Amino acid sequence: MDIVLTGKKAMVGGSTRGLGKAVAMQLAECGAEVTLLARNEEKLKAAVADLPVPAGQKHGFLAADFSDFDSFQRVVSGYFANRGTDILVNNTHGPAAGGVTEKSIADYQAAFDTLFKTVVFLTSAALPSMQKNGFGRIINISSLSIRQPIPHLALSNIIRPAVSAWAKSLSSEVARYGITVNNILTGYFDTERINEIYSGQALKLGITLEEHKARMARDVPARRFGKPEEYGYLAAFLASEQAAYITGANIPIDGGLTKGNL
Ligand SMILES: NC(=O)c1ccc[n+]([C@@H]2O[C@H](COP(=O)([O-])OP(=O)(O)OC[C@H]3O[C@@H](n4cnc5c(N)ncnc54)[C@H](OP(=O)(O)O)[C@@H]3O)[C@@H](O)[C@H]2O)c1
């Protein structure tokens, strides 16, 4: 089976590095014309230059800040006023770590604005062209925290399930237009952010980053972290014509880390 996305337009959030960039690379590799979305113009330009062009596509970028909802709305509305997209990958930076009792109402509001409001707004801006074209793929980068709360990540545990619930309701409303909406439940992936977070933890534990990651990997049945390119393969499949009958789903990619049968 070949995944061919030639002629499709894709927008990928949080895509100058990490999982978002890996997804963008794979969509581009399959022929899609990709628009990267993140806040730093210099990093965006550099990331666009890295994207493959097997079909001679012209990739681009949109600079917007997920942490400033008012300006985010303005930038996104301006972009979609005269353009559409076929594939939308909703991905933002993760919320700050910490337990429930450490978080203030302002922290919950900020996490809701970043993780939920930007995703709902961006999707509503992208839907009209998908409905018109009778094709759309909305892929939300989420976490296994929606099924299994992760210690010390209260904001992810609490806000991400709202995105899944929203996606489920949306999927049933737009399926008739050939639009699918799915959530990817992310396990441990070897990204720059994870290395930054784990370096701090390793320092506190008095061990090296590599030792810390090796200990974490022992909890994963596959005994390793995921590779960002493996993430890209799943996203490219969900974006394809072949995945037309998969919608409203929470799909884990975690080497078996999530416990439980459902
Ligand atoms: N990696 C994992 O193992 C893992 C596990 C579970 C869940 N996740 C979730 O998956 C998502 C991606 O993770 P990752 O490890 O790839 O993250 P990452 O390496 O930190 O990448 C985040 C991306 O978002 C952009 N970004 C950061 N702040 C932004 C802002 N205010 N406005 C616009 N763009 C912003 C960054 O680019 P600029 O700085 O250039 O703007 C970057 O491209 C996160 O939500 C994370 O919580 C990851």
Image (cartoon, rainbow, N blue to C red):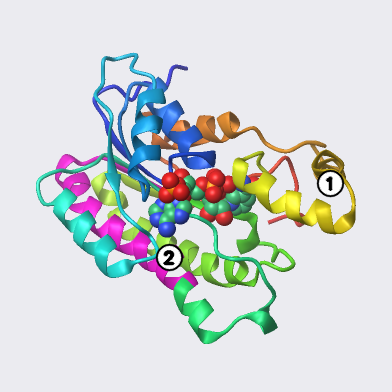
Residue 154 is inside the magenta segment: no
| Mark 2 crowd level (few <14, some 14–19, many ≥20, 10 Å Cα) | many
In the image, the segment drawn in magenta is 111-139
| Residue bearing mark 2 | 114
Decide if residue 178 is on the left or right side of residue 43: left
Label 2 to label 1: alpha-carbon separation:
29 Å
**Main SS category, magenta section:** helix
Q: Which mark is residue 137?
A: none
Query: Could you tell whether 233 is left or right of 253 in the image?
Result: left
**In the rendered image of this protein, does residue 116 appear above or below residue 24?**
below
The residue lying at 15 percent from left, 54 percent from top is: 78
Badge 1 local density, few (<14 within 10 Å), some, or many (20+)? some
Between 45 and 56, the one nearer to me in the picture: 45
Look at label 2 and name its amino acid. Thr
Q: Quadrant of residue 25?
A: top left
Residue 23 percent across, percent down from the top left: 47, 35
Q: Is mark 1 within 8 Å of ligand 1?
A: no
Query: Which corner quadrant of the image does residue 73 belong to?
Result: bottom left
Q: Secondary structure at mark 1?
A: helix
Label 2's element?
helix
Q: Residue 191's spot in the image, x, y percent?
A: 62, 40
Disc number at residue 212? 1
Exactly how many numbered labels are in the figure?
A: 2
> In the rendered view, does 88 fall on the left or right side of 151?
left
Dot placed on the residue nearer the N-terminal end, 2 or 1 = 2
Is the C-beta of the residue carrying label 2 under 8 Å from the nearest atom of ligand 1? yes
The amino acid type of the residue labelled 1 equals His
Q: Is residue 14 visible?
A: no
> In x, y percent, where is residue 152?
72, 68
Q: Nearer the viewer, residue 101 or 117?
A: 101
